[in-house]
Image: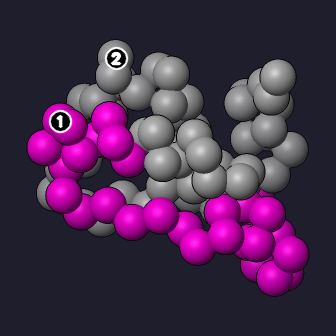
Amino acid sequence: MVNKTEEFAAGHVPGAVNISHEQLPARLAEVPKDKDVVLYCRSGKRAAVAADVLRANGYTRLSHLEGDMQAWSANGRPIA
C-alpha cells in the first residue's frame, strides 16, 4: 500500500497541497471553488476518485494533470 504522505514528501509539483482522496470529504473547505484545481497522484487512480468527490460537491473548475506525477517527473519538470 502506498503511504500518500511519504509519496508527497518524496516529490511533488511545486506549490501543490497534499489532500488525500480519503481525507477529501472532511477537508472540502480547504479546496477553493473559485479557482482552477489541478488534481494528480502518482498514476491517476486516486486523482480520479478525488475528482468524483469534488464534482459531487459542486466543484466545476477541475482538471487532471496529464500523465500524473510519473509523467511530470519523467519530463524533467521541477519537483519540490
Amino acid at dot 2: Ala
Q: Nearer the viewer, residue 49 or 37?
A: 49
- Which residue appears at 86% of the width and 75% of the height? 74
| Residue 75 visible (yes or no) | yes
Toward which corner of the image does residue 40 lie, by quadrant? bottom right
Element under disc 1: loop
Question: Between tags 2 and 1, which lies in front?
Answer: 1
Q: Which residue is mark 2?
A: 26
Instruction: From this view, report whether residue 59 is shown above or below residue 15.
Output: above
Considering the image in quadrants, where does the N terminus appear?
top right
Considering the image in quadrants, where does the C terminus appear?
bottom right
Q: Is residue 77 magenta?
A: yes
Q: Nearer the viewer, residue 22 or 17?
A: 22
- Which residue appears at 24% of the width and 63% of the height? 61
Question: Callout 1: few (<14), some (14-19), or many (20+) C-alpha neighbours within 10 Å?
Answer: few
Q: Which residue is mark 1?
A: 57
Magenta residues?
A: 51-80
24 left or right, relative to 46: left
Residue 23, given in percent of the width and then of the height, sits at: 47, 20
18 left or right, relative to 35: right
Instruction: From this view, report whether residue 28 is shown above or below residue 48.
Output: above
